[in-house]
């Protein structure tokens, strides 16, 4: 178990259970004590969710083992020691996960099966290449969606065997992470909280989603991305709930467009573009236009530290930064503005990309996600977008400004909420 950290609605676990037949089945999670800039905040969300995985597995008589350290070494040792007949894992398009899997595959001689438990239409199935934009992946997903958007079977129970305990305190102690970015209080981790949260969203807010999801003052978004990131809830389960809910077609369509099409487009980007984590992943037209404007005069030029401490001249940008730092989740509309202003106020797109990614992944509960790489690449480098009217610094990259925000929502209210 790696990306999809849940017991219910998990195709990888279901497949493992199926092939295990009447033999034993165990779940192994390998914890790396430091991971790509994650702080205590993200580890906390993950470990608290894993506690629930442990309890859920236990109720089904399935042992849960957590090893700590090098994935390839630990997993191959586990396979040898326990004489496993097969290893099943979930899917992740990120390079580090793909590298780990390659190393594991090279160090074991049992069957090793990858199941895409994250996407509704498996990423490798929906397309064999990098898709240009939402309009190119949408028909490919829609064509096969009905055959994948099916209900899940129950994972079932095993015979009672030895169920080892997990020393959670020791796992926390062993983390080599920045503890100054800590847990948040407003969002409870774990599969049960995720289910409750999405249920409430569908009941109380989804109807307002089409009209108000771009207004950061209105609580009209689902706040489900941290749960999706750690696989504490399945996107397929959410889509089934939304499909069956008694809501307007507009609300259903608007939400499923983001949950399915946009989200699965990000996985496609990271799977087929090895440069998803740098400006080299941008389309040719964007690299060209940004290059032509690299020497344009910048009215403001901030350091990473100034951005991090929300010390720009723009109270709206500073409020967005503070929302992310304190809450661990910036509103989606503000993420676009936030990243585009970093492009405008740094020496060039390379520095902008680096600063945006660093801050995003340090503070956001849903950081280090394909959606984050694709979102920043969209804002700074036109990925999945088209060329717009040419202007200073941005070239043909889509521009956003303060007055545009003012026309869309009550900027002062948002600034007030995230005061220094
Ligand atoms: C600069 C920038 C950085 C971003 N960083 C991240 C990140 O680190 N992690 C992350 O998960 N998302 C990121 N996003 C995408 C998006 O902003 C978040 O997924 C969304 O704000 C999460 O909040 P929500 O669950 O309340 O969204 P809702 O609006 O309720 O949407 C429901 C779900 O649909 C998907 N979704 C919504 N908007 C997008 C989008 N633009 N692209 C892809 N999928 C989408 C997400 O899975 C989301 O959880 C980023 C976007 C930008 C522009």
Image: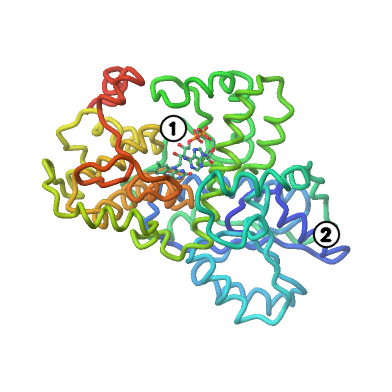
Going 82% across and 64% down the picture, which residue do you hit?
A: 19
The answer to which of marks 1 and 2 sits earlier in the sequence is 2
Question: Is 22 in front, or is 255?
Answer: 255
Q: Going by the image, does 44 lie left or right of 24?
A: left
If the image is split into quadrants, where does the C terminus sit? top left
The residue singled out by tag 2 in the image is: 18
Q: Residue 63's x, y, as percent?
A: 71, 59
Q: Residue 138's x, y, as percent?
A: 61, 44
Going 69% across and 39% down the picture, which residue do you hit?
A: 237
Query: Among all residues in the image, which is located at the extreme right?
Result: 22
Q: Residue 42's x, y, as percent?
A: 44, 48
Question: Is 290 in front, or is 169?
Answer: 290
The CA span between labels 1 and 2 is: 38 Å
Which color mode does the image show? rainbow
Q: Residues within 10 Å of mark 2 (few under 14, many from 20)?
A: few
Q: Disc 1 on helix, strand or loop? A: loop
Going 50% across and 23% down the picture, which residue do you hit?
A: 220
Question: Is 398 in front, or is 165?
Answer: 398
**Would you identify the image quadrant in which residue 274 lies?**
bottom left
Which label sits in the foreground, 1 or 2? 2
Q: Which label sits on residue 94?
A: none
The reply to whether the residue tagged 2 has its Cβ within 8 angstroms of ligand 1 is no
Q: Going by the image, does 292 lie left or right of 165?
A: left
Question: Is 251 in front, or is 313?
Answer: 251
Vertical side of 172 occupied by 109: above or below = below
Q: Going by the image, does 284 lie left or right of 66?
A: left
Q: Residue 266's x, y, as percent?
A: 51, 50
Q: Are marks 1 and 2 in contact (CB under 8 Å)?
A: no
Q: Residues within 10 Å of mark 1 (few under 14, many from 20)?
A: few
The residue singled out by tag 1 in the image is: 185
Q: Going by the image, does 144 lie left or right of 352?
A: right
Q: Disc 2 on helix, strand or loop? A: helix
């Amino acid at each position: 178990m790696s990306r999809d950290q849940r017991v219910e609605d998990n195709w990888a676990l279901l497949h493992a259970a199926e092939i295990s037949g009447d033999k034993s089945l165990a779940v192994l999670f390998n914890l790396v004590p430091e991971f790509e800039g994650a702080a205590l905040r993200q580890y906390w969300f993950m470990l608290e969710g894993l506690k629930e995985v442990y309890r859920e597995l236990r109720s089904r008589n399935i042992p849960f083992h957590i090893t700590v350290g090098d994935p390839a070494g630990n997993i191959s040792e586990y396979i040898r020691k326990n004489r496993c007949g097969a290893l099943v894992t979930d899917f992740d398009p990120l390079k580090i996960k793909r590298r780990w899997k390659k190393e594991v595959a090279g160090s074991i001689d049992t069957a090793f099966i990858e199941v895409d438990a994250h996407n509704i239409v498996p990423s490798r199935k929906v397309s064999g290449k990098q898709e240009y934009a939402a309009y190119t992946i949408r028909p490919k997903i829609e064509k096969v969606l009905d055959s994948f958007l099916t209900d899940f079977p129950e994972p079932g129970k095993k015979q009672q065997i030895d169920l080892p305990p997990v020393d959670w305190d020791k796992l926390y102690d062993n983390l080599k992470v920045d503890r100054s970015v800590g847990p948040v209080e407003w969002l409870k981790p774990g599969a049960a909280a995720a289910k409750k949260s999405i249920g409430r969203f569908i009941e109380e807010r989804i109807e307002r989603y089409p009209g108000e999801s771009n207004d950061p003052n209105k609580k009209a978004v689902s706040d489900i991305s941290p749960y999706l990131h750690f696989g504490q809830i399945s996107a397929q389960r959410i889509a089934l709930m939304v499909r069956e809910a008694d809501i307007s077609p507009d609300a259903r369509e608007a939400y499923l467009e983001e949950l399915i099409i946009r989200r699965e487009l990000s996985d496609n980007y990271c799977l087929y573009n090895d440069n998803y984590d740098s400006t080299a992943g941008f389309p040719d037209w964007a690299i060209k236009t940004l290059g032509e404007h690299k020497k344009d005069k910048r009215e403001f030029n901030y350091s990473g530290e100034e951005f991090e401490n929300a010390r720009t001249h723009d109270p709206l940008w500073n409020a967005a930064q503070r929302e992310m730092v304190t809450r661990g989740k910036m509103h989606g509309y503000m993420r676009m503005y936030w990243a585009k202003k970093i492009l405008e106020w740094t020496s060039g797109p390379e520095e902008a990309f680096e600063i945006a990614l660093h801050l995003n992944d340090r503070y956001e509960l849903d950081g280090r996600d394909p959606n984050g790489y694709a979102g920043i690449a969209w804002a700074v480098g036109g990925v999945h977008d088209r060329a717009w009217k040419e202007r200073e610094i941005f070239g043909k990259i889509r521009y956003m400004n303060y007055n545009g925000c003012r026309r869309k929502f009550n900027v002062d209210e948002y600034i007030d909420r995230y005061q220094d």
